[in-house]
Image (cartoon, grey):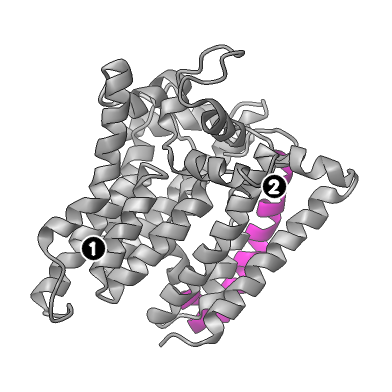
Amino acid sequence: MITRSAARDALLIWFGSRAGLLVATLLGSALNAYVARWKQWDAGLFVVIARHGYDGDPAAPPDAGLPAFFPGLPAVLRLVHLVVPDWTACGLIVSLVAGAVAMVALARLAELEGAPGWMAVLALLLFPTAVFLAAGYSETLFLAFAIPAWLAARRGQWTGAVVLAAAASCVRITGLFLAVALVVEYVPHRRARELPARPAPWPLLAVPFLPLAFYSYFHYSRSGDWLAWKHAQEAGWGRQTVWPWESWITTWHAALGRDDFAVAFRMELAGAVLAVAALVWLAARRRWSELVYTGLQAAALMTSAYYLSIPRSLLLWFPLWTAVAALGARRPWTLVVYGLVAGPLMVLNAVRFLTGAWAG
């Protein structure tokens, strides 16, 4: 049962955590340097696309990796820039507002499944890579569409679900996995006659796949490459597809190094172990649609030439956070232990990101 306090609790935790990050960032720096601290890594690439398109900044060397970023966030940045002059600030504002929407939706989804909503939100915000929910990255915007889409599907509101999922597909390739999971979610509801009197027709489930088709055609019209977004990952980050054991071995050796990147690769290995554990749990509980959503992401990430952004991608695994909330409701000590372990790692990773170190 969803309580009226779910949204209130989610927003209190979300904005409270943002205030904490603000204070931590401002310590030792002037107020006007706050925004500059967040102009790191992909946040700058999203701004480049928003300002100049996929050809990149004409004054800078060409960047073959830009097509890997879907156009949803750059489009929203351009809209916000109409009233906010600083591009990096635009990214922070989008993440702040989108994050509020996502946290409310996550709390409501958790309560729909019988778990305390605030626990799901707290678990997500304490995760070691939660800094990316504050930065001008695409995670929060994706979640702002994806979680409401899943919530609508659970309620049998399929028109809203597919429209929201289509919006999520404009933001990240992860929207493709969400679209497939919605099809899997639809089938048992359809057979059990749990849908409204006039259920959504099957063709409607194709809507979330359309943004990927349009985006692929856009780059095909520019370069003749239907899979430009995939090939951009290979060109920009060397992410060719390999056997999963090869990916693990490569990452393992990288994690044994003594350079700064070794720390991030150790987190990648830990994230992979956590991801596999979550997949086993979903399979054991026969939560097939959620297993498809998370499993497809895991398969894509763990067959890359090396592990990259697995802990970041776990932020998008909303079934994981509702599961943590359910466990915390039954055994409160587990949430305390989780917070004691994850919280310091979250602070460490936030510091790494804000100082320009690679943080996933």
Q: CA distance from mark 2 to mark 1?
A: 34 Å
Q: Is residue 273 visible?
A: yes
Q: Amino acid at mark 2?
A: Ala
Residue with the most extreme front position: 82
Residue 97, how many percent across, how many down? 59, 59
Q: Is residue 247 above or below residue 8?
A: above
Residue with the most extreme left position: 191
Q: Residue at x 35, y 59 (%)?
A: 164
Asked if marks 2 and 1 touch (Cβ < 8 Å), the reply is no
Looking at the image, residue 226 sits to the left or right of residue 14; the answer is left
Residue 175, how many percent across, how many down? 34, 49
Q: Is residue 203 above or below residue 104?
A: above
Residue range highlighted in magenta: 324-352
Looking at the image, residue 313 sits to the left or right of residue 230; the answer is right
Looking at the image, residue 197 sits to the left or right of residue 237; the answer is left
Q: Main secondary structure of the magenta part?
A: helix
Residue 82, how many percent across, how many down? 61, 43
Q: Quadrant of the N terminus?
A: bottom left
Q: Which residue is mark 2?
A: 350
Q: Nearer the viewer, residue 3 or 243?
A: 3
Q: Amino acid at mark 1?
A: Trp
Q: Quadrant of the C terminus?
A: top right
Q: Residue at x 25, y 66 (%)?
A: 159
Q: Residue at x 66, y 74 (%)?
A: 12
Q: Quadrant of residue 212?
A: top left
Which is nearer the N-term, disc 2 or disc 1? 1
Residue 209: which numbered mark, if any?
A: none
Q: Is residue 350 magenta?
A: yes
Q: Is residue 344 magenta?
A: yes
Q: Which residue is mark 1?
A: 288
